[in-house]
Amino acid sequence: MGAPTRTIRGLMALGLAVGLVAAFVAACGSSGLGGHNGSGSSLPSGLESNLDELDSYQFQWQDTSDLSTALATDAGALQTSGIVINGPAKSYMINALGMIQVIVIGSKGWMSHDNGATWKPDTAHSADSSALLALLPYSAYGSVFDTNAAEFIAGGSENKNGIDCIHYTPSADLRVVTNMAWPHAAFRADLWVASGGNYPVSGFYGWSGTPGVQLGSWGYSFEITNVDDSGNKVAAPTT
């Protein structure tokens, strides 16, 4: 069994919305609206891969969609959480949408549909499989933050989730072109990146539109916590 269809549909809707904004930003940039008004440096792309350099961490991510173009089953908050152990054998324990639970240790996987009361072997989820990667916090990071990396500007140092971070915020240009693309929507985006290790720690990207006027409301958010915590453990199920 692959990643839940509702998750994939939600991410597709999110990616489409962000892609439309990114295309509009690029078009306006070529007409003289691009560039940076801030004094900080731009966000480097590909930072999500640095999460693989951590020993372990816990995560939570959420895709909230109320797009008028989405199917009724895609509406609402799609929330997934879990634990990632990067070595010596990559291991994962994930609660996807409160609907399925997945445990992966190396090439072996198990799935539960009753909150861990019973488990069955699962061949679809294994370390680095596409079904598993779709459930991880960076499954949508690239399409959201990497797509607009040049338009996120580094600000001051802040502590987020107990980690010293650099706070990135959207440039004035990104705000302007987003408002031009969706004039009835309120846009907000924030990203915190660890000062040491250069990995994403927390982020939000989305907007809320006026019902019946715009596409609707949507947003993608994630949190990385308990980095390299000795309490991060994943064990094979016994039931």
Image: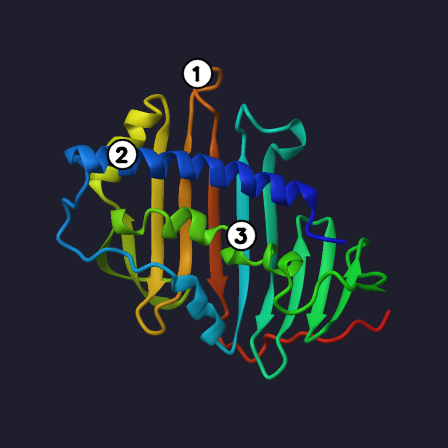
Name the mark nearer the viewer: 3 or 2.
Answer: 2
Query: Position of 120 compared to 69: left or right?
Result: right
Rendered-image quadrant of the N terminus: bottom right
Residue type at mark 1 is Val
Q: Tell me which residue sits at (61%, 55%) in the image.
A: 135
User: Going from the N terminus, do you reach mark 3 or mark 1 first?
Assistant: 3
Q: Camera-side residue: 22 or 153?
A: 22
Name the mark nearer the viewer: 1 or 2.
Answer: 2
Looking at the rendered structure, the secondary structure element under dot 3 is strand
Query: Position of 104 compared to 212: left or right?
Result: right
Looking at the rendered structure, the secondary structure element under dot 1 is loop
Name the mark on residue 213. 1
User: Going from the N terminus, do you reach mark 3 or mark 2 first?
Assistant: 2
Residue type at mark 2 is Ala
Q: Tell me which residue sits at (80%, 53%) in the image.
A: 113
Marks 3 and 2 sit apart, C-alpha to C-alpha, by 30 Å
Residue receiving disc 3: 61
Residue receiving disc 2: 27
Q: Camera-side residue: 14 or 66?
A: 14
Q: Tell me which residue sits at (45%, 53%) in the image.
A: 141
Query: Position of 206 compared to 101: left or right?
Result: left
239 to 43, vertically: above or below: below
Marks 3 and 1 sit apart, C-alpha to C-alpha, by 28 Å
Residue occupying the far bottom of the picture:
88
